[in-house]
Every structure is written in C-alpha cells, then in structure tokens.
Amino acid sequence: MLSKNQLGFFYMFISVCAFSLMDLIVKWSDDYPVGQVLFFRGFFGIIPLLFLIPKDRYFDFYKTARPMLHFKRCLAGLIALVSIFIALRNLPLATVVSITFAAPIFTTIFSIFLLNEKVGLYRWLAVIVGFIGIIIISEPGFSSLNLYYIYPIIFCLGLSYVAIAIRKLSSTEPVWLISFFFSFSIMILSFFSFYQKWIIPSFIDLFLLSMVGILGGLANLWLSQSYKLSEVSLVTPLKYLALVFAIIFGYFIWDEIPTSKTLIGALLVIFSSFIIFRRELVLKNKISITRNE
C-alpha cells in the first residue's frame, strides 16, 4: 500500500507526462487552425470533470457567488493557452518549456500588487536571476526579430494571474467548478474561429486532437491531487522533468537540438523558480501554480 507522499509523487509524475504529451500533440497539430484545436481542448476537457460533480449538484453545479473572478481567471487562462499553443507551433519544444518555468517569477511580482504581499531580498534576487535566464534563452529570437519568443512570456504572465485568481477562488469554490468554467470558456472561444476554415480530421487525427482535451483535463486534476496528498516540497521538483521530455521529443521527432544558451537559461530559470518556491515554504505561503491548460 502506497503512502500519501508516494501517491502524491505518482500523481505528479503522470501529470507531468500528460502535459508533455499534450504539448507534443499541440506542436504536431500545426496543420489544424489554433481555434479548432482549442475546441477539442475545451470540449473533451470537460469530460473528466463530469465524473467529479457531486450527485446533489447535477442540476445547479454551475452556480457561483463569484462570477466576475471566474471571468477574470478564464480570460487570463485563455490568453495564456492561446499563447502557449502559438509558441509550441513556432519554437523548439525545449525552448518553450524552459521559458514557461518562469511563471513563479511573474506570480511573485503579481502577488505584491494583487495580494499586498511583502517580497524579501531572496525572492527579489531570484526574480532577477530568472529574468536573466529568460533573456539568455530569448536573445537569439529578439536579435533576429523572432516575435514568437514573446508568446511563452505572455503565457507566464497569464498563468501567473491564474495562480493568484485560483488561490482566491479555492477558498469558496470546488476545483471541478473552477476547471469546468475554464474548459467551457475555451470551447466558446473556439466557436469564433470558424472563419479559419476548420479541417475535417481523419479518424487518427480525431483521436489525437481529442486527447489534447482529455490529457489537459486529467493533468490538472492529477496535479491538484498530488498537492493534496503529499508534501509540496517533495513533488514540485518533478515538474522540471517536463524539460527532459521536451528535449527527448524535440530531438527524436523534429530533430531539435537545444542550444547551450537555451540550456544555461533554462537552468537559471529553474534555479530562480526553485528558490522562490523554497522561500514560499519557509514563509508558509505556498503558491501552487497549475498549468490549467
């Protein structure tokens, strides 16, 4: 029988695997319009959530006392999701994943203005180190005017606000309701992209596109379950396995070889986010940033 920490470790591992596979499929799906892929993420992302709705909430599960905060959370999440989809299609997989690790840096900054938190010297130094890492990773793109490097940074900004909003919502709202509103908003947004001339997928493509939603939905639930069961300090470092998977997938599928600048910048970003995470634990003010894709 596994202990709670071991179960949490397992849930974190399969969550990272699911997110990595979802990123892989999104990058592969560049023949399909972004809006069409968003539809599959939203529609099939709702399916896992249906099994979590309590029986006594079947007919009023959508009711909430905080509609505006849900709206802001969904808007930030949609901006982040569209940005990461565009980035995955136009940049090396390892580069995108490396920059996304910077989300805690922006969350730290947002927490000052949105939660009135005090940030000490250690976290400010970590923020500076993280930004240096982003500059090192992105410098080739900025120097050649490759604006696609902006999208993973926009993703980090959106995800950082999402983390703050979820922290506020979690005090009164169940996780499944927060996730439902987000998946539903993704599906609604996708309907405005019909002008992009959606493509009728083959049976295999239909299966793969549907997995974008199922994997995204399950990955977020597994991530939440991991934090619920185990010590955050034990399972959080596993998230950085995503970079290993990105390097492997990128190399064997798209012949992408990470540059030394990408790897050095990634190490600085990971070091920065890890320091921020450790300081949050010391201060007993944990910020768990779920990707919520």
Image (spheres, rainbow, N blue to C red):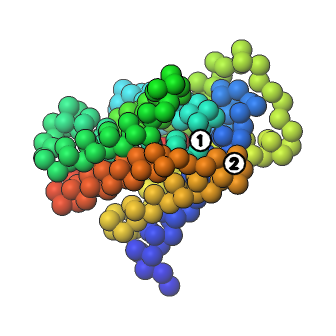
Residue 49 pos. (x, y %): 56, 48
Residue that mark 1 sits on: 92
Disc sitting over residue 255 in the figure: 2
Lateral position of residue 199 relative to residue 269, left or right: right
Q: Looking at the image, which residue is at 24% across and 48% down?
A: 126
Position of 236 with respect to 195 (left or right) is left
Chain-order first, disc 1 or disc 2: 1
SS at badge 2: loop
Which kind of residue does numbered mark 2 sit on? Asp
Percent coordinates x, y for residue 290 in the rendering? 43, 48
Q: Is residue 120 left or right of residue 140?
A: left
Q: Where is residue 177 shown, x and y percent of the image?
A: 47, 43
The crowding category of the residue bearing disc 2, from other C-alpha atoms within 10 Å (few below 14, some 14 to 19, many at least 20), is few
Kind of residue at disc 1: Pro
Relative to 62, residue 7 above or below: below
Q: Residue 90 is drawn in which quadrant?
A: top right
Given the current orientation, which residue lies at the most extreme top position?
A: 195
Residue 96 seen in the current view: yes
Q: Tell me the tag on residue 242.
A: none
